[in-house]
Image (cartoon, helix red, strand yellow):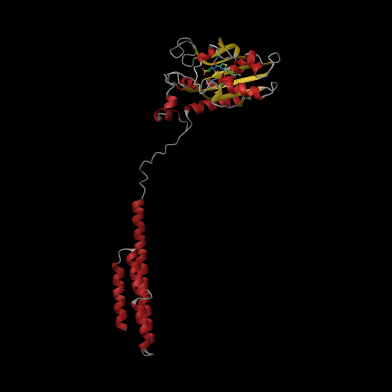
Amino acid sequence: MKDRLQELQSEALEKVKQSEDLKALQDVRVAYLGKKGPITEVLRGMGKLSKEERPVIGQLANDVRESIANAIQTKQDKLEEKAMEKQLEEESIDVTLPGRPVHVGGPHLLTSIIEEIEDLFIGMGFEIKEGPEVETDYYNFEALNLPKGHPARDMQDSFYITEELLLRTHTSPVQARTMKQKDGHEAVRMICPGKVYRRDTDDATHSHQFTQVEGLVVDENIKMSDLKGVLNAFAKQMFGSERDIRLRPSFFPFTEPSVEMDISCKMCGGEGCSVCKGTGWIEILGAGMVHPNVLEMAGYDPEIYSGFAFGMGPERIAMLKYGVDDIRHFYTNDIRFLKQYHKA
Ligand code: 2U9
C-alpha cells in the first residue's frame, strides 16, 4: 500500500505538471482527490492493515493527499495568472490609438435661433404660446381680417384639407385664439413660434414648410412707439447693439398701419454691399398696429384697446446670421451642413 501511495503521488504530480489549463487541472483534482479517487480507495483498505501499520499508512496517505493538493493549488495559481496576463495582453488598450469619435448631436440651427428669439422676448415679459398646425379657415384667415374671397388669401397659397380645415399659413391664428380665449379685457403679451405651410415650389428662398415667430401685444393705450421700442430692443440683442433699425411703411391685412423693419447691414455697416444689395439695410420682419377689425372679432373694443403685432422668419434670420444661401439646407438634414452649426 505504501508503494501504491507513492506511485499515485508521482503519477498525480506528473498529471498536474502536464495540465495545460484549469479544466485539465480540475480533472486531476477530481481524479486523485475526489471521493471516488484512488487515494480514498487506498484508505478504504486501511481495515486490512495491522494496527502498527495503520498510523504509518494513514499519515503517508494524508501527506500524499496534501502534496497533490498543494501542487494542484500552485499550478492553479500559475494558470490563473497566465490567463490574466493573456487577457490583459488581449484587452490591453493602446492609449495612443485615437478614440472612436462619439458623434454628439445638438440642437438644429433653426431650433437654436428660435430659442434665442424666445429667450429675448421672455426677457421682455412675453409668454410663449403654441397652437394647432391644422387650423380652421376662420382662425387662419377670417379672424385676421381676411374674409372668404379676400385677394390677400392668394398671397398665402394654402394646403386645404377640407372646406374649413387647412395647414396654417402663419402662426397668427394662435394669437387670434389667445385673444378670443381672454375675455376681451385681459392684456395680451405673447409670441408664437411654429411651423407654417404654404403651397410653394421649394427653391433657395422658398419652402412649402417653414417656421415663423410672430408676436402680439394688446392692452389699453398701446402705441406705435411701444412697437418700435420692442423691435429696437429685439434687433440690438439679436444682431448686436451697434445695429440700427429703420421702419418702412408696408401693408398687411391684419395690421394698420403696417411696417417692415430693417437693420443696418453688418457687412458694410450701412454703406451698401452685395449682401444688402447696395441699400445698407437688411429686411428682418414685418409688423404693425393690430387692425381694429381683428381686435373686434376677438372681442376687444378698439375704442379702448389697441395692440401691435410682428412676424419674422427664423430661416431668414439664420441665413443672414450664418451666411446660409439656400433655405432647403434647413430641411434636407445633410449632416455636413448641420454639424457646422452645432454648438458643443
Ligand atoms: C394678430 C394680429 C396681427 C402678425 C404679423 C407680420 C406682420 C409679418 C411675415 C414675417 C415673415 C410673414 O413668414 S413671413 O414672411 N409676417 O410680416 N406678421 S404683422 O400680425 C398679427 C398676427 C396676429 C391677431
Q: Nearer the viewer, residue 73 or 309?
A: 309
Quadrant of the rendered image containing residue 27:
bottom left
| The N terminus: image quadrant | bottom left
| Horizontal and vertical percent position of residue 332 | 41, 27
Whether 119 is drawn above or below 66: the answer is above
Note whether residue 263 is visible.
no
| Horizontal and vertical percent position of residue 2 | 32, 83
Note whether residue 112 is visible.
yes
Q: How many marks?
A: 0
Whether 170 is drawn above or below 271: the answer is below
| Horizontal and vertical percent position of residue 215 | 59, 21
Quadrant of the rendered image containing residue 121:
top right
Q: Quadrant of ligand 1?
A: top right
Relative to 309, is 323 on the left or the right? left
Q: Residue at x 35, y 55 (%)?
A: 87
Q: Nearer the viewer, residue 64 or 209?
A: 209
| Horizontal and vertical percent position of residue 9 | 31, 76
The residue sitting at the front extreme is 163
